[in-house]
Image (cartoon, rainbow, N blue to C red):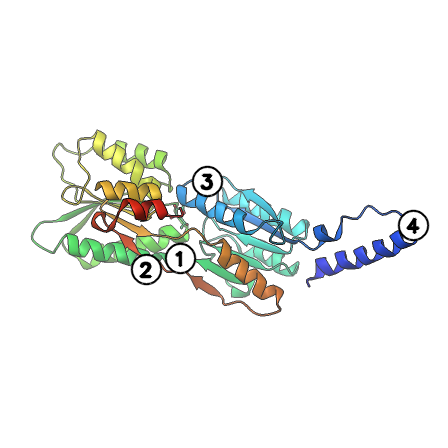
Amino acid sequence: MNRKRSVLSALLALSLVCAACGIRTNLAPEAEEDLIVVGMCQVGAESDWRVANSESMKTVFTEENGYRLLFDDARQKQENQISAVRKFIQQQVDYIVLMPISESGWDSVLQEAKEAEIPVILVDRMVDVADEELYAAHVGSDFRREGAQAVQWIETACPETEDPVRIIHIQGTLGSTAQLGRTAALEEAVARHDSWELLSQLDGDFTQAKTYEVLTEYLSGLPAGQEIDVVYCENDNEAFGAIQALEENGYACGKDSVKVITFDATRNALLECMKGKIALAVECNPLLGPMVERVIQTIEAGQVPVKHHYVEERTFTAGELTEEIIQQREY
Ligand code: GYE
């Protein structure tokens, strides 16, 4: 039992004694006091992936399962996340679950959580801190490996010839682990392949609206007839915005025209993939709630959790998809 709940139990025992003596107290009933309080700092609701990720957490961390979930939506601003962590420290929650927007800037606030003896579990993205002891565990995806899967697919789909492979790269929120890993894989491949040409890198901030806006602007400045081979979007919502912008500017999307690549592979993206508009969807699993709960239960049992948990992920192309697969998709 942790520090706060043991204090609460002592108070509860006292309240029972008081009750026996006929003295009234206003302490909450026992069931309430036994809940594990989890303060959750979510990035926002910028994408289908994120919404599924929040849902997964809310499904697991329920009162029936023994938790009180305090959920904070940072609306994609790191300063909001930092204030939420501070608020959770003040409230003396039992655990802080943090989906960090960017990797940098976490040392001091995580040090404060450590001093308050509140374990911090990182979910989805990572933090870049000098001391690894500032967090108990990390549960998420290997974004570099996801990027490598996409690059491998381009290598097969666009074999090295005299013809250049013209790539537009739509990046995710700059400085986030998902962006850094997926970008690094592509940039390394561009450096390796003489024929790969990066036409432009645009910041889509993982949203459909921003991608539509920046890509529309970029396409409007291109010379007529400019060929585009690949649009590498760092998530599904960027891919949706990109397809709209490309089509409005006269480009067809498909495996024999502009090859749109996406990451996440949520249901809507799989539908676009089955229709042929997305050439490759690289899976990124948002259903991380059960893994986070296992970390908490390990700590509750007095054991040390594994520091990094990565989820298994696959890729999809049109030929591999059926209505049934899409209907069964949980996110
Ligand atoms: O790919 C994107 C989201 O960090 C894995 O963030 C996450 C990414 C995901 O907004 O859709």
Distance between mark 4 and mark 2 Cα atoms: 64 Å
Q: Is mark 3 within 8 Å of ligand 1?
A: no
Pointer 4: residues within 10 angstroms few (<14), some, or many (20+)?
few
Residue shown at the point (31%, 49%) measured from the top left: 325
- Pointer 3 residue: 45
Q: Residues within 10 Å of mark 3 (few under 14, many from 20)?
A: some
Q: Nearer the viewer, residue 207 or 282?
A: 282
Rendering quarter of residue 255? top left
User: What is the three-letter code of the residue carrying label 4?
Assistant: Gly
Q: Label 4 belongs to which residue?
A: 22
Task: Determine which residue is flagged by label 2.
Answer: 145
What's under tag 1, amino acid-wise?
A: Ser
Q: Is residue 30 above or below residue 74?
A: below
The amino acid at mark 3 is Ala
Specify the label residue 141 is tagged with: 1
The answer to the question of whether label 1 and label 4 lie on touching residues, with beta carbons closer than 8 A, is: no
The alpha-carbon separation of the residues under discs 4 and 3 comes to 50 Å
Earlier-in-chain disc, 1 versus 4: 4
Circle 1 crowding by C-alpha within 10 Å: few under 14, some 14–19, many from 20: many
For the residues labelled 1 and 3, the Cα–Cα distance comes to: 19 Å
Q: Secondary structure at mark 2?
A: helix
Q: Is mark 1 within 8 Å of ligand 1?
A: yes
In space, the residues marked 1 and 2 are separated at their CA atoms by 9 Å
Which residue corresponds to the image point at 53% horizontal and 48% vertical from the top-left?
A: 59
In the rendered image, the residue lying farthest to the bottom is 303
Question: Of tags 4 and 3, which is closer to the observer?
Answer: 4
Amino acid beneath label 2: Arg
Q: Nearer the viewer, residue 148 or 34?
A: 34
Q: Earlier in the sequence, mark 4 or mark 2?
A: 4
Instruction: Name the residue: 28% across, 44% down.
Output: 323
